Image (cartoon, rainbow, N blue to C red):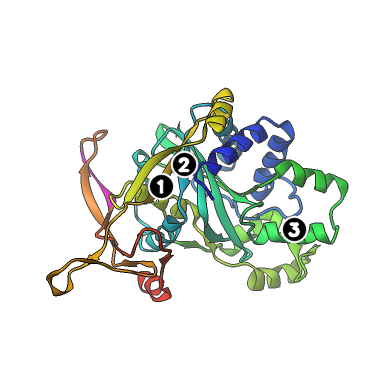
């Protein structure tokens, strides 16, 4: 995939955001995943009640998710970012090594709004244990309750790297399980498989890597109970006894997507990361500029390094077959807070040692992940 392909996907997303039907379907997905309205088939039951806000505030916030996602798509000043596949493993690795008490710093977010594409998607699991893949992140900065916030929505690219939900949709298409209305809805959604929407508040803790629901929280997720599914993926209604069994056997701790994606913003501000601009060809630039969209994409990748060996007193190139991470850890770093005049702490990624040539794949060992927990 070329970095400038992300510009084409952003262009397509803009036209989706201008489609009333796309807006309506996305709104239904967000509402139903929150338990506020009836779910639709194959919705990703991932968004759960947020204890930080009252029910009335949550309804306002859910509307804010939709409005923010649409503005990011439609406004001409929204920059486009493309994250090379090599970065995704590092982001997943570094996310595991953070503490739950790490604080959100909105200053690390590089622009007031943005459209971000991960060449290699970030993986997370929902409460049903399904693997969801984040390809696209759209965000917008704002203010809520006097505090800076970042409003973000995550999408899977159903066309390029379908996740478990998208694969089930494709399977149902082959078996012709959809009615006409459902088929039309899928056509409208296109490649944009909505996964989750979140709000990050400046100064809040990012929380644990995995979240577990207590029994009361699970019972509040009406969309899960109303649309539980059997082993074949068919939706069924559950009585009280069956519901208790389903909760025990079918619901799992789910990934803290807020923490995972925020790690990207942290890594983006570290010295091992290089950010360069790449322009589309002339025809692409003219087309994008005509539609008031950026014609340059910011490419995020590892900073290029030349590795040599000094055996026998002479430098020679090393023909590594891959790249790998040696060491690397987060450290708290104190800073003065301009707003309060006091002191705040930020996470700094210390001494990551990346070995291997730039054109070789990054490999991470399972033991590294185990030790990181």
Q: Residue 110 appears in which quarter of the rendering?
A: top left
Q: Which residue is mark 1?
A: 300
| Sequence order check, earlier mark of 1 and 2 | 2
96 on left or right of 135: left
Residue 199 highlighted magenta (yes or no): no
Q: Please give the label number shown on residue 41.
A: none
| Sequence order check, earlier mark of 1 and 3 | 3
268 on left or right of 224: left
Q: Please give the label number shown on residue 81.
A: 2
In this view, the residue in front, 364 or 91, is 364
Residue 343 highlighted magenta (yes or no): yes
In this view, the residue in front, 149 or 347, is 347
Q: Dot 2 lies on which element?
A: strand
The magenta span reads: 342-347
355 on left or right of 124: left
The answer to whether the residue labelled 2 contacts the one labelled 3, judged by CB atoms less than 8 Å apart, is no
């Amino acid at each position: 995939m070329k970095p400038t392909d992300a510009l084409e996907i952003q262009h397509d997303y803009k036209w989706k955001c201008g489609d009333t039907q796309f807006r309506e379907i996305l709104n239904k997905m967000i509402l139903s995943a929150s338990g506020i309205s009836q779910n639709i088939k194959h919705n990703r039951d991932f968004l759960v009640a947020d204890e930080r806000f009252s029910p009335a505030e949550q309804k306002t916030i859910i509307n804010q998710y939709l409005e923010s996602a649409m503005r990011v798509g439609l406004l001409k000043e929204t920059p486009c970012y493309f994250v090379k596949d090599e970065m995704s493993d590092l982001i997943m690795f570094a996310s595991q090594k953070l503490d739950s008490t790490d604080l959100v710093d909105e200053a690390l977010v590089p622009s007031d709004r943005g459209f971000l594409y991960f060449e290699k998607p970030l993986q997370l699991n929902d409460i049903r244990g399904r693997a969801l893949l984040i390809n696209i992140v759209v965000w917008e900065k704002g203010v809520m309750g006097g505090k800076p916030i970042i409003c973000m929505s995550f999408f899977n690219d159903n066309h390029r790297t379908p996740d478990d939900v998208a694969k089930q949709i494709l399977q149902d298409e082959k078996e012709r399980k959809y009615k006409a209305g459902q088929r039309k809805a899928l056509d409208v959604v296109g490649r944009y498989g909505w996964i989750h929407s979140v709000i990050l508040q400046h100064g809040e803790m990012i929380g644990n890597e995995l979240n577990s629901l207590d029994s009361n929280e699970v019972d509040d997720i009406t969309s899960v109970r109303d649309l539980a599914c059997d082993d074949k993926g068919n939706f069924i209604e559950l009585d009280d006894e069956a519901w208790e069994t389903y909760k025990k056997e079918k619901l799992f701790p789910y990934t803290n997507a807020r923490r995972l994606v925020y790690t990207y913003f942290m890594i983006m501000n570290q010295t091992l990361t290089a950010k360069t601009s790449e322009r589309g060809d002339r025809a692409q630039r003219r087309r994008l500029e005509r539609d008031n969209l950026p014609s340059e994409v910011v490419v995020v990748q590892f900073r290029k390094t030349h590795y040599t060996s000094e055996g026998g007193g002479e430098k020679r190139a090393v023909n590594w077959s891959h790249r790998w991470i040696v060491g690397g850890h987060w450290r708290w770093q104190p800073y003065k807070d301009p707003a309060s005049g006091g002191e705040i702490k930020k996470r700094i990624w210390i001494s990551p040692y990346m070995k291997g040539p730039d054109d070789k794949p990054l490999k991470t060992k399972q033991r590294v992940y185990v030790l990181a927990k």
